Amino acid sequence: MKARMQFGMMPISGKAGELVFCYNRRTGGMYAREYKYPTLTGNHHKMGGVAKNLFAIKPTEDFKYDCRTYAYLYATSRKNRGVKIWTWSNCYLHLMYALAAALPGIDLGTLTREEIYQQDLPCISIKRAVEAGLLEVVDNYARLDNQI
């Protein structure tokens, strides 16, 4: 549910009793929801293992900068299809899951940097990912060619 503060009060984030307040500084909106701890399943552990492995690849700072730039360009384009890409990590995970969907033989739980270079996968750079159809085309994507 959307929440509002009284006149002139700063928005808050965090827990307050049974409610959790979330403030999004980009949209200026504040939301409140009831605090519920999720029931953990095997899928949570699998996705956590995949994310841990993907971040163990340790993308370079230049690649992270390209991901940040792509996220900004994507967020400001009018044609994004409701997919929220705000940060470099959102862009990186979105790219890797799109890679796994496009190439079913790729196991994100065991993928390494060496395999990416050996198989010449399109996730090496944002430019190649856009050209391969893993990410949507944005303006000036051709300059985002730093390697992972």
Image (cartoon, rainbow, N blue to C red):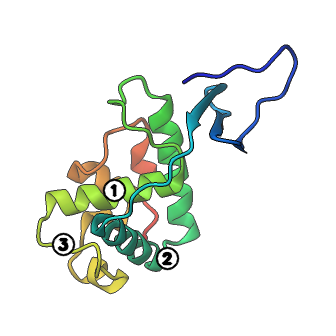
Q: Residues within 10 Å of mark 1 (few under 14, many from 20)?
A: many
Front residue of this view, candidates 127 and 50 = 50
Q: Which residue is mark 1?
A: 95
Compared across the picture, whether 53 is left or right of 116 comes to right
Compared across the picture, whether 112 is left or right of 20 comes to left
Q: Is residue 130 visible?
A: yes
Q: Which residue is mark 3?
A: 106
Q: Amino acid at mark 2?
A: Lys
Q: Is residue 128 visible?
A: no
Query: Residue 42: x and y, percent?
Result: 29, 69
- x 83%, y 28%: residue: 10
Task: Looking at this view, name the residue that lies furthest to the left.
Answer: 104
Q: Amino acid at mark 1?
A: Leu
- Secondary structure of the residue carrying numbered label 1: helix
Q: Give the image quarter of residue 106.
A: bottom left
Q: CA distance from mark 1 to mark 2?
A: 15 Å
- x 54%, y 24%: residue: 1
Task: Looking at this view, name the residue that lies furthest to the front.
Answer: 18
- Secondary structure of the residue carrying numbered label 2: loop
